[in-house]
Amino acid sequence: MLDNNGNEIGKVGSQSEYPHYCLFIKDDSQLITNSCHFYNGMTIGVDSNKLDGINIKAWEDSDEYIYLDEEMRVYAGVATKNYYT
């Protein structure tokens, strides 16, 4: 994670092989990240208020995130008032 000046403020490790997509929810309260391997993917959600100093290790379960989807790859998305598409 980088701040507005490009300084590292935290780390969110990939939960699958190839990290490639991030999206903030419309009100910026949550960040989702997706990583994939072949036809499967893993999407996690992180509380945006906890990004400063966060250190989520790759491939490890953590109380710092929630699983949103454990099967699909994400290549594009839109955050609306009530959900992601």
Image: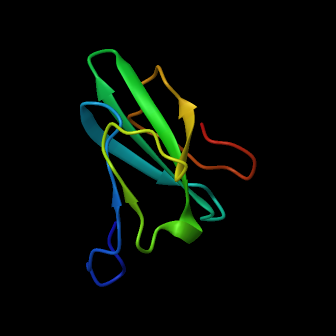
The residue most toward the top is 39
User: Does residue 73 appear anywhere in the picture?
Assistant: no
Q: Quadrant of the C terminus?
A: top right
The x, y position of residue 42, in whole percent, is: 43, 30
The quarter of the displayed image where residue 3 is located: bottom left
Question: Image check: 5 left or right of 29?
Answer: left
The x, y position of residue 25, in whole percent, is: 60, 55
Q: Is residue 4 above or below residue 10?
A: below
Q: Quadrant of the N terminus?
A: bottom left
The x, y position of residue 79, in whole percent, is: 60, 49
The x, y position of residue 82, in whole percent, is: 75, 47
Q: How many marks can you see?
A: 0
Camera-side residue of 76 and 27: 27
Q: Is residue 32 above or below residue 72?
A: below
Q: Is residue 2 above or below residue 56?
A: below
Q: Is residue 59 above or below residue 1?
A: above
The residue most toward the bottom is 5
